[in-house]
Image (cartoon, rainbow, N blue to C red):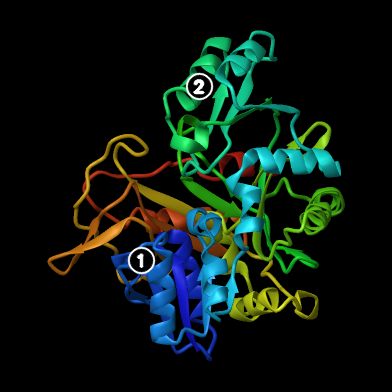
Amino acid sequence: MKLMVIGGGGREHAIVKKLKENPEVTEIFVLPGNAGMSADAVCVPIKALDLPGIVRFAAEQKIDYAVVTPDDPLAAGAVDALEAAGIACFGPNQRAAVIESSKIFAKDLMKRYGIPTAKYETFDRLADALTYLETAPIPTVIKADGLALGKGVVIANTREEAKTAVTEMMANGRFGRSGERVVIEEFLTGPEISVLSFTDGHTVIPMVSSMDHKRAGEGDTGLNTGGMGTLAPNPCYTPAVAEVCMNSIFLPTIRAMREEGRPFKGCLYFGLMLTADGPKVIEYNCRFGDPETQVVLPLLKTDLLTVMRAVTEERLSEIKVEFSNQNAACIVIASKGYPSAYQKGFPITVPQSVLPHVYFAGAAEKDGQLVTSGGRVLGVTAVADTLEAALHDAYEMAGRISFEGVWYRRDIGARALAWKEN
């Protein structure tokens, strides 16, 4: 089979490596990919949002199956375009992808169907938002309605911070059209849990849970990032919590989308917070998370392509999806200065023994040498019988990777280990 994966980061590299395990796969193209994953797939310089170019390439190459992973092309209708051209796809269509592309839609969906989430108000006029903030509980959370590269959320600890955030979004165009409408919601506290799930619109099969580390600084301080490291499973996600989530969140969400005439087929990401009142939804993503995918897929024992095709063909209930009982940890290695300004073009050195454990995100080729080309350059993942061992091995490998300005958090997993001890 000839496969095509849309995207170009560490998440896509993890998916490519897992798809390669299927003996029926003869070739994988990744559009656009990056130079670091060229040993595992053929990188094609077609951008993820070039839908006509993607469809044309798929037809020319007679692609048997396509996987669309980033939020932007899903929201733009990449799956719709490929399916219209007769190419089977993994991923939600445009109508279903709205669960991520509009936070207002997602919040209103949860309200209509009784799915637990933070209390909220929505605004499309700045004056109304500012008036509300005069008396809103503080701290509060400000969210741009649309896609914003994972950066459209501000936790405001004062009224002034909140007013500045909504003004930046709604009046100053900080996130373009994505910030023209905002959600202002209740600030919740508790451990955060990420659960990716396979769903064909009827059956939902949660993957192993994970814990992300969003802040740039150690001790969970500093600016929000795309993710500085992950581990799986999340020790906060006990069997009892999992049962509550299945009955009060996962299945009701799938049913709600079907009731709305937007059946969701693909990977639905549940961003959860375990509050004193039980688990609540913080956000939905309409695709695999990054870097959660880099710890979840290494623990998947069932063939990924088999599961994906069952999702596409709406026969997921026929498939037994199994995960290893081991632990996985991923350390994201970034360029100095990320998520603010950083330099590019530095040669990357990865020992041959570490390479199988590396997922490249921000890498390019220059004069036959891999060089840095992004803020998050790569992630290195280790799998072991215990979380402690997985973290030890991941950090040991991370320490053997070098480039000028190499930087990573040294406390990934600290929260999880503290939770286990308690």
- How far apart are labels 1 and 2 at the CA level? 33 Å
Q: Is residue 347 left or right of residue 136?
A: left
Q: In this orientation, which residue lies closer to the viewer: 7 or 415?
A: 7
Kindly tell me whether residue 421 is visible in this rendering.
no
Residue 391 position in % (x across, y down): 52, 53
Residue at numbered disc 1: 32
**Numbered-mark total:** 2
Q: Is residue 80 left or right of residue 26?
A: right
Q: In this orientation, which residue lies closer to the viewer: 205 or 401?
A: 205
Give, as a three-letter code, the residue at label 1: Pro
Q: Secondary structure at mark 2?
A: helix
Give, as a three-letter code, the residue at label 2: Ala
- Tell me which residue sits at (45%, 87%) in the image: 62
Q: Image quadrant for the C terminus?
A: top right
Q: Secondary structure at mark 1?
A: strand
Kindly tell me whether residue 131 is visible in this rendering.
yes
Kindly indicate the quadrant of the structure image that contains residue 262: bottom right
Q: Earlier in the sequence, mark 1 or mark 2?
A: 1
- Tell me which residue sits at (53%, 91%) in the image: 24
Q: Is residue 409 left or right of residue 404?
A: right
Q: In this orientation, which residue lies closer to the viewer: 42 or 10?
A: 42
Residue 45 against residue 232 in the figure, above or below: below
Kindly indicate the quadrant of the structure image that contains residue 365: bottom left
Residue at numbered disc 2: 165
Other-residue count near label 1 (Cα within 10 Å), few / some / many at <14 / 14–19 / ≥20? some
Residue 271 position in % (x across, y down): 66, 46
